[in-house]
Amino acid sequence: MPVRLGLLPLIAHLRALCAVGEADLTVGALTYWTDELLQAELDATRRTVYGAPLIALPQFIDGAYRYYEYAFPTALGTWIEEAAPESGFAVRDAFGVAISSGFSVNYRARRVLFAEDQEGAAYTLDARSYDLYGAAASIWEQKAAFAAARVDWSATHGLKSSQEYEHCTAQAMRFRQLSGVRTATFLRTDEVRE
């Protein structure tokens, strides 16, 4: 599967968190850690949100409130796939129509910035969010498994692969803790409302 352009910044960040190159290891016919493999790890943590209301952030300018800036909803998560073909990212007006111009997005600051005053108009966001730390923990666990499969060896500096295994498992635990608690919305379908 080709790598989605909107995920490239997250893939680069994940690669840095996990200290992996594009061809660190080959097992059988599979090369670790290509962009496709990192995308698959991110997709395993993906959560898609439709119609999340953007939060208007009014500014008091020249005696009146102006609405240029809107914040992403908190429930969306921190790591967002950027707008690109097949990214699922869309800013929508109050009628649900996707708008494609007149604004810019700062993904790290979680803001939509309009060029013109929006006068408090309602907007929603469709987006995919990812648990970057959960994906990093999964990669570190896999790295630990690869290290555990190797026999101990001694180098000039006295390093052993068992130390690498311990380092990988410690990193996996660290990122699992950073990942936090996962929640889901529970919807009962066995009740009838009148």
Image (tube, rainbow, N blue to C red):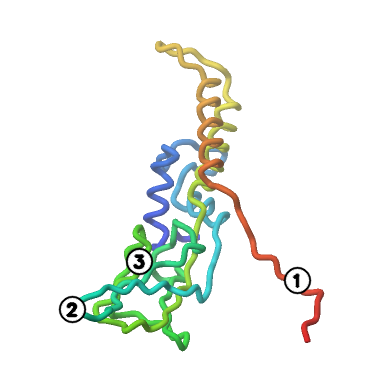
As shown in the figure, which amino acid type bears the numbered disc 3? Arg
Q: Residue at x 56, y 35 (%)?
A: 173
Which mark is in front, 3 or 2? 2
Q: Secondary structure at mark 3?
A: strand
Q: Residue at x 56, y 31 (%)?
A: 169
Mark nearer the N terminus (2 vs 1): 2
Q: Which residue is mark 2?
A: 62
Q: Secondary structure at mark 1?
A: loop
x, y percent for residue 3: 44, 59
Outermost residue toward the front?
A: 63
Mark nearer the N terminus (3 vs 2): 2
Residue 67 shows which numbered tag? none
Q: Secondary structure at mark 2?
A: loop
Marks 1/3: CA–CA distance: 34 Å
Q: Is residue 174 above or below residue 97?
A: above
Please state which of residues 128 and 57 is positioned toward the viewer in this rendering.
Answer: 57
Q: Which residue is mark 3?
A: 111
Local packing at callout 1 (Cα closer than 10 Å; few below 14, some 14-19, many 20+) is few
x, y percent for residue 108: 35, 58
As shown in the figure, which amino acid type bears the numbered disc 1? Arg
Q: Which residue is mark 1?
A: 188
Q: Is residue 103 above or below residue 168?
A: below
Which mark is in front, 2 or 1? 2
Q: Are the residues at dot 3 and dot 2 in contact (C-beta closer than 8 Å)?
A: no
Q: Are the residues at dot 1 and dot 3 in contact (C-beta closer than 8 Å)?
A: no
Q: Is residue 51 above or below residue 78?
A: below
As shown in the figure, which amino acid type bears the numbered disc 2? Asp
Marks 3/2: CA–CA distance: 23 Å
